[in-house]
Amino acid sequence: MHEQITEVASNDPARTSPRRTKVRWLIAGLLGVGLIIAFIDRANLSVAMPTIGKEFGIGPWMQSVLLGAWAWTYAVFQLPAGWIADKLGPRTAYAAAVVWWSACTAAVALVRGVGTLFGLRLLLGIGEAPVMPSSAKAVSEWFPKRERAIASGIYGAGSEAGAAIAVPLVSLIIVAVGWRGAFVATGALGFVWAAAWLWIYRSPSEQRWTSQAEVDHIATNGGDEAESEPQERSLPWAHLFRHGTIWGMFFGYICRNFLNYFFITWYPTYLVQEQGFSTMDMAKYGAIPGLVAILGNFAGGWFSDHLVRRGTPLSLARKIPILIGTLGSGTVAFAVFAPDAATALVLLSVSFASASFASAAIFSLPIDVAPGPGNVSSIFAIQNTGSQIGGLLSPIVIGFLWAATGSFVVPLVAMGVLCLAGAAVYAFVVKVEPLPSEAEPTVTAG
């Protein structure tokens, strides 16, 4: 499955124990915390923007550009970041990325104008580019097929948790020490995580806390030798783009992530402008959709793996939660009819939780369709490039529509339509099976 490491000393108590250890779940938890920090550092500007906008005299259009700036470089650097993660492995690639973006986050405390802030947000996007490809690579190394969706759900929940935590956390820090101190505090989190990651993360056969039983469990796909991972037979990087499934994953994620990035860019402004929230109101209630979405992430991952364990074909076990989630997320459009803030929050929570219900299965797709382990991060990077194109377009389009119409009615309806379009792409274009390893693939829908 992956490179084999020299035999561990027989006196290692963890390795010789007959018990199956659960270190892989610690790895999933670390990945989740890493994503929480990444999303806090993406969303902190949206929370601070009302204050920064007043201080620097930034209008709505420039605010939308600043809020989405990190996604520009994040999208551009996805493909090279995926290639680097495949070559260097998740331990090195992820740690270096966190140190980079944490330094950029803390440096925002020093800005004195729009230009410097814009530059630092572009650098933030470069630093965060390896996050998702590295996470997918780590899951492919540490989890058998029948546990990958819930493992992906655990780390994927970090996106919703980070977006949810950022609103009250950054709001409270701003109240206590100002917006500059908030960026220093959130930037410091990443340095602590990077140190823990470098100390703990190794491949399963190198990690001294794992028992041989756990290593075997991973290598044999949960004890089923018939489903053990194929040996390395990766496609050349450029050949990946010859497959319809890859393009389906790319375009499907553009549609889906348009909604998600609303919650880490314009959502606080929506609460203030459309629902009349104060900063303290955001600290009290703003995290509700994100917290509900965390549960959706876990539920979707558990459900997909449950279907696999029951013998459901892998294609259906992934597509069913994806379709339930992407169709359900379209309820965001009904928020335009909400008679009050409470109802709007309920509808937004249902929408965000539905999108998250699909996340774990979507995150598992690159592992499921990769012809060999050497393509996992690269395929995830292609998929995530679509995600970030959606993330790039979302704040700009929503900001334009809001400025043009004076309300969030049209943006919310547009997000609902895109959610339905994403469901159609996943249903009819994406085929959940390993890509052919031959050099003559054909572009087909499935």
Image (spheres, grey):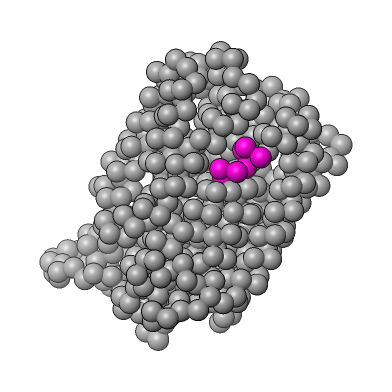
Indicate the quadrant containing the N terminus: top left, top right, bottom left or bottom right. Answer: bottom left
Q: Which residues, given as a range, are shown in magenta?
A: 391-397
Residue 392 belongs to the span the image colors magenta = yes
The chief SS type of the magenta part is helix
Indicate the quadrant containing the C terminus: top left, top right, bottom left or bottom right. Answer: bottom right
Quarter of image, res 430: bottom right
Q: Is residue 442 visible?
A: yes
Considering only vertical position in the picture, is 30 above or below 440?
A: above
Nearest the eye: 297 or 65: 65
Nearest the eye: 223 or 274: 274
Residue at the spot x=42%, y=29% of the render?
A: 120
Q: Position of residue 17 (x, y in %)?
A: 25, 69
Q: Position of residue 404 (x, y in %)?
A: 76, 32
Q: Position of residue 34 (x, y in %)?
A: 41, 45
Is 116 positioned to the left or the right of 294 in the image?
Answer: left
Residue at the spot x=62%, y=42% of the render?
A: 394
Residue at the spot x=54%, y=71% of the render?
A: 244
Residue at the spot x=56%, y=13% of the render?
A: 55
Q: Is residue 148 visible?
A: no
**How many numbered marks have been drawn onto this rendered protein structure?**
0
Q: Position of residue 63 (x, y in %)?
A: 59, 27
Is 100 positioned to the left or the right of 179 in the image?
Answer: left
Can you name the residue that lies furthest to the bottom here?
Answer: 226
Considering only vertical position in the picture, is 365 above or below 89?
A: below
Nearest the eye: 139 or 70: 70
Is 208 positioned to the left or the right of 402 in the image?
Answer: left
Residue 446 belongs to the span the image colors magenta = no
